[in-house]
Image (tube, rainbow, N blue to C red):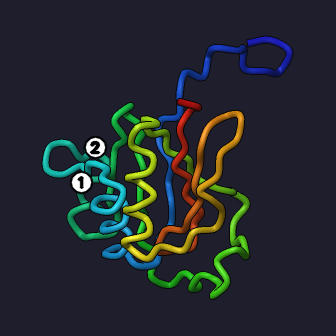
Amino acid sequence: MTNNTIPIGYLRKVHHIALNVQNMTASRHFYGHILGLHELTGEEVPETLIELVATGKVANFVTPDGTIIDLFGEPELSPPNPDPSKSFTRAYHLAFDINPELFDQAVAVIRENNLVIAYGPLTRPTGRGVYFYDPDGFMIEIRCDPS
């Protein structure tokens, strides 16, 4: 490395995203059942997290491309603002890509679960998207490329 920079290409992909959650049960249901992500269990759990997972303080989910979403239970977190459009973090949103043919089905699932939609569904030159909130008020996007 030179010039105090990490050269382009050294960082290969997002490895994981860690989120503090107030209600682990609600968040596990949201990420595992509503969004359909695979929860790591048994021997899938990284060795460094086995005890935290066993005590219910951490849950790990993985996307089909291998990105890990770590949920850290923080029951003492302040509850989200009753107005979910009020950001409580510097992070803006977490975006998941979906096959364009499945986009409308994902929107139907969001509506069936009475999730608060922030924006959309909308269509832009870059594709379609819908923004909604997880149980802790963190904005989630499901988006697809133009079909």
Instruction: Give the residue pinned by disc 1.
Output: 50
| Label 2 crowd (10 A; few <14 / some 14-19 / many >=20) | few
- Image quadrant of residue 93? bottom right
- Image quadrant of residue 80? bottom right
Tag 2 secondary structure: loop
| Label 1 crowd (10 A; few <14 / some 14-19 / many >=20) | some
Disc 1 residue type (three-letter): Ile
Residue at 68%, 34% in the rendered image: 126
Residue at 26%, 52% in the rendered image: 39
Residue at 39%, 43% in the rendered image: 102
Disc 2 residue type (three-letter): Pro
> How many callouts does the rendering have?
2
**Quadrant in the picture for the N terminus:** top right
**Is there CB contact under 8 Å for labels 2 and 1?**
yes
Instruction: Give the residue pinned by disc 2.
Output: 46
**Closest to the observer, 103 or 57:** 103
- What is the C-alpha distance between the residues marked 2 and 1? 6 Å
Residue 12 picture location, percent across and down: 55, 21
Residue 91 picture location, percent across and down: 68, 56
Residue 72 picture location, percent across and down: 43, 64
| In this picture, residue 103 sits left or right of residue 117 | left
